Amino acid sequence: MDVDKEFMDRLSVLELTEKESKLYYYLLKYGPKTPTKAAKSLGTYREDTHRTLTALVDKGMASVSIQRHTTYSAVPLDVALESLRLGRLHEQQRIQEAEQTLLTLSRDLTPNFPEDSDNFKMLKDPLKIIAESKQTILRAEHDLVFIPPDKLGSERRFGVIDAYIEAKRRGVNIRAVLDIVPYVVPATRELIAHGIQLRHYPSYRGVRFLVIDGRESLTSISLDKPRPFVESVAAFWCNSPTYARHLKTLFEFVWSQSVDAAERIAELSALDYTE
C-alpha cells in the first residue's frame, strides 16, 4: 500500500475527516505553510483550507504563528495523537455523565399510555436494544424477571449489569435464569453478590426476555447471533400485561426446572474451568 495513503487512512480512523488527514500530513511532511500556499499545493480553495486548518488547531493537531504572514505548522505526531486521545476520553466522559443524568431524571417520568391500548415497537440495532434494555430495567419498581441473551458476560461494558444492580439497590425483587458456562461466571458472581437471585438451566435454547412489574417486556428475537453487531438482530418491546403474563408463566416454569447458581459455579470450580 502507498505509504502516504496508508498514513492518511490511519488518521481517518482517529476521527479526522479526509480533508483534515490530508492537510495534517501535508504540513507534517512539508513544514509550515500559509493557507494560500497549502490550498495551491493541494488544489483546493483557500477558504476551505483555512476552515480545515482551524479545525486542526481546535483538535490540537496544528499550531498557528502570526508574523508577517499567518502560517500553520503540524504539531509533532506523538503530541497530536495524545491530544486526540484526551479529546476522545473527554467526549466519552461527557456522554457517560449525560446518560447518567438522563436516567436519573427519567425515573420521575411516568409513561402516559392509554389504559385500553397496548403499545409495542421493534428494535433492529444492537445499541438501541441495549439502550432499551437498560431503560426498561431502570423503570422497574417492584419485580423483574429475565432470561438474558447468551452473552451475559459481554453486557458488562454496555452497562446492563450495572442497571440490574441499580434496580436491586432500589429494592426491586430480581430473579434470573441462565445457562451458566465458564465465560459468564464473573458476571454471575457479581449479580449474586448484589443479592440478585440466579438459577442455572443447562443448555437453555428458549426465548430470551425480561419482564418488569408484570406489565412491560422486552423479548430478544435474534440477539443471540454469533456476531450481533454485524448480523441483523431484532428485539420486541411492548407494555401489554397479557403478553407479560405469558412470559412470566414461561419464566416460572423454567425457574422451577433450574438449579441454584451457586451450586453450578461450585461444580465448574471443581472441574477447574473457571478463572
Image (spheres, grey):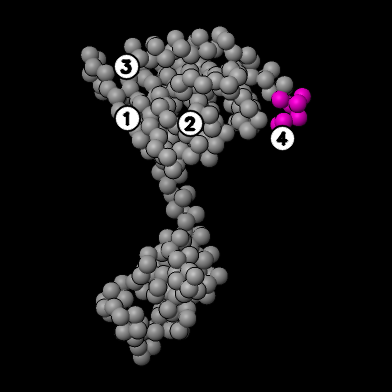
Between label 2 and label 1, give the one nearer the viewer.
Answer: 2
Between label 2 and label 3, give the one nearer the viewer.
Answer: 2
Residue 128 figure quarter: top left
Where does label 3 land, which residue?
240
Using the image, determine if residue 51 lies above or below residue 65. above
* Magenta span: 268-275
**Neighbour tally class for label 4: few under 14, some 14-19, many 20 plus, Cα within 10 Å:** few
Q: Please tell me whether residue 156 belongs to the stretch shown in magenta.
A: no
Q: CA distance from mark 3 to mark 1?
A: 14 Å
Kind of element beneath mark 4: loop
Dot 1 or dot 4: first in sequence order is 1
Dot 4 or dot 3: first in sequence order is 3
Between label 4 and label 2, give the one nearer the viewer.
Answer: 2
Do the CB atoms of the residues marked 3 and 1 lie less than 8 Å apart?
Answer: no
**Neighbour tally class for label 2: few under 14, some 14-19, many 20 plus, Cα within 10 Å:** some
Using the image, determine if residue 138 lies above or below residue 173. below
Where does label 4 land, which residue?
275
